[in-house]
Structures are given as structure tokens and as C-alpha cells.
Image (cartoon, grey):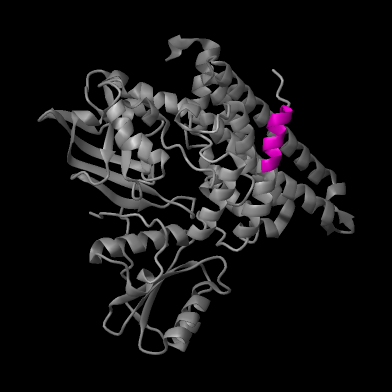
Amino acid sequence: MSIRLRLDKPWRPLTAEEAARLPGQLGVYQIADAGGVVLYIGQAGARSTFGLRSELQRELGERGAGCQFRVEVNMQYRSRWFELLMVHQADHGSLPPDNAKNPPPNLGRLSPA
Amino acid sequence: MDFEPSSEQQMLIDQVRRYVREEIIPLEAKLDPDASELSPEDHKRLVEKTKAMGLFGIDIPKEFGGPDIDIVTRTLLAIEMAQHRAGLYVPCYGTFGGAGLAQIFEANDDQKERYLYPTLRGEKKAFFGLTEPSGGSDPARAIQTKAERKDNGWVLNGAKIFISNADRAQYGIVFARTDASKGRAGITCFIIDSDTPGFHVRRVVHTLRSSHYATELEFKDCWVSDHQVLGEVNKGFAVANDRLTRQRIPYAAGCIGVAIAANEMAIEWAKMRSTFGEKLANRQAVQWMLVDNEIDIRTAKHFTLEAAERARRGLPFRTEAAIAKLTASEGGGRVVDRSMQIHGGMGMTKDLPLERWYREMRIRRVGEGPSEVQRMVIAREILGSNLR
């Protein structure tokens, strides 16, 4: 049984066209700069109007052009979000910079093999 | 046995019911439907309220500063505390405080100083490490994590799975096999600090509970001293078993609370919603579903309070706790399922708490001993212990 810890799909440019093509489903996403450095790990929860699509459209509106993104449709969006944050912390020693500004309370720690 | 609440119990029930309806549910409406935590500010504010109510640290024994609530009253309050969206697994978002793991109250004085008191002060959190990839229903035989003697201590090697909070805890209680030839008499309970070299939280285990996750642990040449043995060597299974039996009563109470809340929603909806020119409440098919809900709830409540009352009196309650856990988890699941059916399409959405309860209630038929194990416990009582 293979269990994928990291979100390792290819990056897509964060543009209005790309965001508009996203599903309206629940899930998680990552935003990176042009060099592929992860800036933020987010979730499209059940309060998002159109799931991943509206979350990424909001991100584009706030960040402007020049970023990249990747998404994962996932009904377990909350536990998957916590997992991605913990894995990032284990891999890099810190949270992505935009998550570090407002870290979730009581985030756990993983030491993935 | 008379299960009618005393006037004092009823006063506490009313107090907790008001707290859930006036404090928890309005805050919850603003959270993600799968959230399991309040903001730190809201949590702190509500803890002050439960302290003012005299109910903070509700599970802490009186001799350690708890509010001296007997197990029957505690069960009645647990039923109330569960009656909100997150209530099955996170009743009132933990604002009534925790007592930590029951086993740590049995620790020696040195261990109490290092673990129990910091836990009661809220400085440390713990996890309970019993289940392994080899199985959870029969831990006495399934435990393969080994602890071997070395340098005035023990070296642990093995894995645990479905362990809650291990990634956030400062220590945990871990069961390991110390004598392979002795079956359940060869298991020892250890207290493991989570910064001990060789202790790893390897991954998150995603389940039906999107709000929360379990973890998988690995012990790789994890050395601990003799001071970390909880209780006696090779007598760890009794520690685990006692906890599993006792835990079944509040576990059942949580299921009942959610079932009551789901049924109340279904009744309200049935009185309000019309189809083909008739209220749902006037249709026999719906009436019968509501009747079946009522019977499931009353049955589970009766058996759960019976188990609690026997525990309060110091009588054996293993069979009664099994019946309570079985009827509450299975009956509660049926109640939530019927309530969703009555709500139709709305019942399937995250707009209402029913879908979360449906997912989480399904876990209750497996957690804390699956239905089949409860039936085995009851069968032994009926047919005699030679069936062991």
C-alpha cells in the first residue's frame, strides 16, 4: 500500500484561466513563488463558495501574477491540511512563510520516514 | 434502579444544556463544519465560564482537586455535552478540561510529579498507545512491539497505529511485550516521553473524521529507564483492560447525546416540512422512523445509566458497559441515519451537522472495542467464562 504524504504534482501558473478551470470541490492547495518555493498551504473547506476554484481565485486576487499553485481534491481537507503543514515543517524546519504569520494552534510534529 | 435525575443532577444538566446552546452552538456556526477547535481566545474565555460553573476538570478525582462528580452524573452531563456538531469527539471543544489518561493516576509518586501533576495543570498532554498494525480488537495477542532488557532499562522496537494526539503530546502510555511466552501476562506498560530518541510519529492516518486524524508511531531502538515502567512488569494488560471497560460508559453517553440532537432536528423538520400537501409528521412512514429513534435512544440511555450506576456502587460492570457501548453506538448510528433520511437532500449536506455525525458515528461501532467484541463479552457472561 503506497501512501503519499507530500503534494508533489507539477506546479501550474496561478492565472485567471487556470483558476477558472479548477473544480468546485473541497481540498487542499499550495502556492509557490516563480522558483517553486512554497509560500502557503491552504484548504478549501465547506465554507468556500466554490471550493478550490474560489479559494485559488481569491489567492490570485490577493497575490497578483507570478505565483504557481497545485491542488488536491480531498474530502478530508482539514486533516490533510494539517498533515501537509507538519510534513513541510519536518522537511524544511519551519512552516511556509505565509502560514507562519498565523499558524494553526497546537500543530503537531511528524518525523516522516 | 431509578434513573430519574435527582434535583441536583437536573440543575447541572440544565446548566450544561444552557452552556451548549448559548455558548458553544453560536460559536460553532462560524467555524468550518469539520473544525475540532475553537480559537485560543474563545477557548480561554469559555474555560473561565466552566470554572465559574464549578465544572472545570470534570474528570479529575476529588482528591486531586476535581469537582467530585459521580459517574452517573458525569454520564448525564456527557449526554448534554455531546449535543452539538463537534460534540461526539470534542464535547464542548474541551472547555470542561481534561484529566489526562486514567492510568497515570496509578503512577508512583515520582511519575506523578513528572507526568500527572503537569497534566492536571494543563502543561502536558498524553497519548494512549495500544493498537498495532497487527490488530486492535485483541490487544493481548496482537501486541508485537517488544521491550527488551538493556542497561538498567528497556529497548522498545515496533509500531502503533490509530493513535490520537501522539504528534501533539509530551508523553504517552505505550504497551509492549516483555515476555513473549506469557500472552496477556507478558505485557508491560511504559511512559514514553515524545522527545525520547527512537520515538517517531511517522504519519497521519486519515479516517472518516476529517476534523481530526490519528497517527502511526514507530519505536526504533527506543531506550527508556526502569523509572518509565507504569505499574509492574508483565502486568500492563490489566492497566489497559480496566481503562477500556471504564471508557465505554462515557463513550456510549456521547453517542446518546448526538442521537438526541439528531432526533430533535428530525422532529422539528418533520413538523415543518410538507410534501405533496402534507406535513412529514403526518406520514406514517416518518412517524415510525421517529418512533424507532425514540426507542433506540431510550434503550441506549437505560443501559448506559445502568452501567454507570453499577460502577458508582462499586459492583462489577464489565457486561453492562459492553451492553451500553453496543446499544448506544449501533442505536445512535441508526438514529442519525433515519434523521438524515427524514431531512432528504438537506440531510446529506455540510450545511447541517448530520453528515458529520453520520461519518463519526460509524467509527463508534469500531472504536473502544468493536460491536463484535462487546457481543463476545456479553456472550461470556451468558454462557460462562469457559468460552474464553
Residue found farthest to the bottom = A65
Look at the image and tell me in which quarter the C terminus of chain B lies. Answer: top left
- By secondary structure, the bulk of the magenta-drawn segment is best described as helix
Give how far across and how far down residue B89 sits, in percent. Answer: 52, 45
Give how far across and how far down residue B25 sits, in percent. Answer: 64, 54
Residue found farthest to the left = B151
Relative placement, left or right, of B133 versus B37 is left
Look at the image and tell me in which quarter the N terminus of chain B lies. Answer: top right
- Residue at position x 33%, y 50% in the image: B167
Give how far across and how far down residue B130 sits, in percent. Answer: 35, 34
The image quadrant that residue B335 belongs to is top right
Give how far across and how far down residue B200 sits, in percent. Answer: 25, 47
The image quadrant that residue B345 belongs to is bottom right
- Residue B130 shows up from this direction: no
Query: Would residue A49 be counted in the magenta stretch?
Result: no
- Residue at position x 31%, y 55% in the image: A109
Q: Magenta span covers which residues?
A: B5-15
- Residue at position x 34%, y 25% in the image: B140
Relative placement, left or right, of A78 versus B68 is left
Relative placement, left or right, of B67 versus B223 is right
Query: Which of the two residues, B170 or B203, is positioned nearer the viewer here?
Result: B170
Residue found farthest to the right = B277
Query: Which of the two residues, B311 or B178, is positioned nearer the viewer here?
Result: B311
Query: Which of the two residues, B119 or B356, is positioned nearer the viewer here?
Result: B119
The image quadrant that residue A97 belongs to is bottom left
**Residue B192 against residue B22 in the figure, above or below:** above
- Residue A57 shows up from this direction: yes
Q: How many marks?
A: 0
